[in-house]
Structure formats: C-alpha cells, structure tokens
Image (cartoon, rainbow, N blue to C red):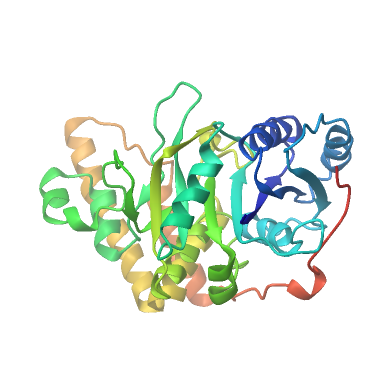
C-alpha cells in the first residue's frame, strides 16, 4: 500500500490547525502514512499548544500518527512545507506521496483517498489537487493557467474585447466542472509524487509567500509531469487566515517580490519587466474606464504605483535566489509523535 505524508503548516493559528489535523486524520483512516504539523516559528506558544493538543488526540485504530515539529525560523510557505517534507515519515522511511494541506482547510472524508487513487491510476500525472470551496459551499477559484505577459494585460484591463482576443491567456479561466488537466493549482490541498519531487526539487525557498506552487507546478510540467484538478476530492477552505490577505490595504513587498522573481526565474528578466509593463498598461485602461463610468478601481490602493516603484527597486537591487538549507533538516524527524 502506498504511503502518504500529510504536511500542515501552522503560523499562529493553533486552534484552527488542530481542526485541520482532525479532518485529515479522518480522511486518512486506513491509509499508510502520517501527518506532520510544522509550526513555522510562530513565537506565540503555538508549538507548545499543538504539542499538548496532539498528545490528547484520540487516535482510533487505522488513524495515522501525528508528528509536531518546530521549523526554528519563518522562511515562508515553501520553506515551512519543505521542512515537513524533509522529516519523512516518523519511522524514518520515505513516503510515496506528499500531501500539502493548509491549516485553514478541512478535507472531506474521502478527499485525500480520491487524490491518492487518482495518482495511482494516472501514472503520467505528477500532482493532483482538490476542488476547494468555502464554508458555505461556494467554490474557490484555485485552478489556473500559467501567468504570461498577455495574461497580465488581460487581467488588469478587464475589458471584454481584450479578454475575447486573449481568451487563451486568461490566467483564471472558468473553474472546471469535471476532473481535467490544468497548468497549476493553489497549494491549499495538493498531492505530489515524491519521485517527482526527487527529480525537480522541493519548493523554491526564495518565495516567501505566493507563486511558490505556481513555480513548482511549472517545473514539474517542464519535466513531463502535469497537474490534474480532481473535482471529486472536496476540501472546505476558509482562506487567508494566516496571511491576512483579505485585510490587505496595500500589496505587500513579499507578493511583489514573488511575482517578479517567478517571471525572472522562469522566463528571464526582460519578460519580468514586460509583464509589469503589461499590468501597468492594462491597469491604466481599466482606470480610464472606471473614471468615465464611475466604477470602483477594485485594485488595492496605490497598486499601480507600488508595482512601478517595485520594478525600479528590483532593477537597482535584483532579488537573489535563496538556497535551500536541506542539510539542517535530516530525514526522519521524530519530535512529539502520537
């Protein structure tokens, strides 16, 4: 039977993380594997709370073990998940699959097994992700095309004729209603073959937040391992609890850094600047229309100005790739196992 390692990253949301753990335990009943909870250096007592709560868990027969570890530093989403992946399974063995689950996401009873069965029966697929929906059942848009210069222009212009001409570049096309191949999926509920990760590497830790799963899916696709969106795997997701994205008043620097680095790394620095120019040009079109029609600008305050200033800043001080620190994290960590 294939082994699955579920990794749940916590940052200052221990109570919600434990709800995610409970849902994952039920969804993994009868499966080989374990759950690793990584506290991403919350420094608010989260690690201690999680350790205590895990020790009190009623681990029924057939449920996976739960392992709580402390990353020791907050390197972001990718670095935190990498830490958990590098631990391997509590018995020191390696999983066949790695399943990444957000701390504010709650898989339905069969959600994880559906992803596992899909990858087992589709050996040419590298990654598989779930249908994500809110607590009210409304679907979240989590299946995308890879970003492009044309896609940036279409997305920011928000103009029907432009969208029709550039329809094949739309980054967020209509959400699939049946299981199908997509370019990339949001990392709230994503299962990956460990053999693919062995081939292409883990998350690029230069990304602090955002674009890291886009980059990982692109690297897998370029290596011949596509990603599938599996509608039968259903996961409830609150969204942005740790990042606070819903309350952003301005786009943070780490998002701008991640966006620029994604383009520069995968398509070259020139394309990174062309993508920014396309975003600015499309944004100018939208703002002109919004002024004429008295519409809301929609974007966060100062978005275009922040985008332009960031482009100047990274031209003067390019983003340097951050090397992963794998040597610090040997496989087979066994902290606080229940």
Viewed as shown, does residue 154 lie left or right of 109?
left
Query: Is residue 71 depicted above or below 262 in this figure?
Result: above
Residue at the top extreme?
Answer: 136
Image position of 200 (left or right of 154): right
Q: Nearer the viewer, residue 290 or 167?
A: 167
Instruction: Where is residue 327? Give x, y as percent.
Output: 78, 75
- Residue drawn where x is 75% and y is 51% of the image: 40
**Residue appearing at x 48%, y 49% in the figure:** 117
Residue 107 in percent (x, y) is at 56, 35
Q: Residue at x 65, y 33 (%)?
A: 26
Picture quarter containing residue 175? top left
Give 332 or 117, whichever is nearer the viewer.
117
* Quarter of the view holding residue 220: bottom left
Depth order, front residue of 222/99: 99
Say whether residue 304 is left or right of residue 188: left
Q: Is residue 150 left or right of residue 81?
A: left
Q: Is residue 118 visible from the viewing direction of this image?
A: yes
Q: Quadrant of the N terminus?
A: bottom right
Expressed as whole percent of the image width and height from the top left, the position of residue 249 reads 52, 38
Picture coordinates of residue 93 (x, y %)?
Answer: 76, 64
Placement of 155 over or under 263, stated as above or below: above
At 52% from the left and 50% from the top, the residue drawn is 116
Residue 317 seen in this snapshot:
no
């Amino acid at each position: 039977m294939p082994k699955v390692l579920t990794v749940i990253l916590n940052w200052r949301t221990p109570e919600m993380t434990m709800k995610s753990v409970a849902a994952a335990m039920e969804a993994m009943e009868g499966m080989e594997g374990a759950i690793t909870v990584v506290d991403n250096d919350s420094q608010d007592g989260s690690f201690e709370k999680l350790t205590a709560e895990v020790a009190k868990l009623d681990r029924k027969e057939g449920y996976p073990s739960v392992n709580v570890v402390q990353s020791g530093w907050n390197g972001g989403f990718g670095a935190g998940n990498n830490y958990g992946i590098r631990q391997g399974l509590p018995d020191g063995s390696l999983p066949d699959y790695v399943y990444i689950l957000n701390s504010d996401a709650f898989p339905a009873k069969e959600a994880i097994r559906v992803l596992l069965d899909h990858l087992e029966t589709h050996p040419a697929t590298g990654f598989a992700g779930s249908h994500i929906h809110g607590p009210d059942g409304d679907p979240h848009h989590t299946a995308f095309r890879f970003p492009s210069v044309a896609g940036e222009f279409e997305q920011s212009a928000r103009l029907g004729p432009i969208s029709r001409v550039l329809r094949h570049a739309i980054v967020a096309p209509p959400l699939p209603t049946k299981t199908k191949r997509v370019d990339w999926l949001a990392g709230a509920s994503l299962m990956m073959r460990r053999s693919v990760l062995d081939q292409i590497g883990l998350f690029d830790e230069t990304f602090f937040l955002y674009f890291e799963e886009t980059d990982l899916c692109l690297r897998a696709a370029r290596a011949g391992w596509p990603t599938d969106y599996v509608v039968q795997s259903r996961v409830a997701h609150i969204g942005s609890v740790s990042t606070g994205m819903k309350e952003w008043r301005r786009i943070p620097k780490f998002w701008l850094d991640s966006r620029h680095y994604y383009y520069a790394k995968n398509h070259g620095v020139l394309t990174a600047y062309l993508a920014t120019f396309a975003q600015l040009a499309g944004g100018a079109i939208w703002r002109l229309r919004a002024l004429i029609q008295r519409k809301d600008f929609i974007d966060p305050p100062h978005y275009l100005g922040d985008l332009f200033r960031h482009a100047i800043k990274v031209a003067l001080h390019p983003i340097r790739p951050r090397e992963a620190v794998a040597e610090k994290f040997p496989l087979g960590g066994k902290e606080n196992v229940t």
